[in-house]
Image (cartoon, rainbow, N blue to C red):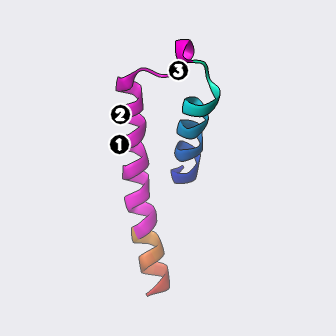
Amino acid sequence: MFVHIALVNVLNIKELPKEIQASIGRKVVLLIAFLFFGIFSAITLWDKLF
């Protein structure tokens, strides 16, 4: 999910025309979800590697 949310956000910003891009509220929610899953990904990697 961490990678998926990042890719969706990048594609939304770079590929979609301004008229149909996500609003600022949705972009904030995507950022929060990205950080949420990123923290858990980092915790999992830390646990498995050390």
Disc nearer the start of the sequence (1/3): 3
Q: Callout 3: 10 Å neighbours few (<14), some, many (20+)?
A: some
> Picture quarter containing residue 42?
bottom left
Q: Which amino acid lies under the numbered mark 1 shown in the image of this protein?
A: Ile
**Are circles 2 and 1 on residues that touch, CB within 8 Å?**
yes
**Are circles 1 and 3 on residues that touch, CB within 8 Å?**
no
Label 2 SS:
helix
Residue 7: percent from left, percent from top: 59, 44
* Alpha carbon separation for disc pair 1 and 3: 18 Å
Rendered image: mark on residue 21: 3
Considering only vertical position in the picture, is 13 above or below 3?
above
Q: Which residues are magenta?
A: 18-42
> Picture quarter containing residue 47?
bottom left
Disc nearer the start of the sequence (3/2): 3
Of 17 and 50, which appears nearest the observer?
A: 17
In the rendered image, which residue does mark 1 sit on?
32
Residue at screen point 43% across, 53% down: 37
Residue at screen point 37% across, 34% down: 29
In the rendered image, which residue does mark 2 sit on?
28
Residue at screen point 39% across, 41% down: 31
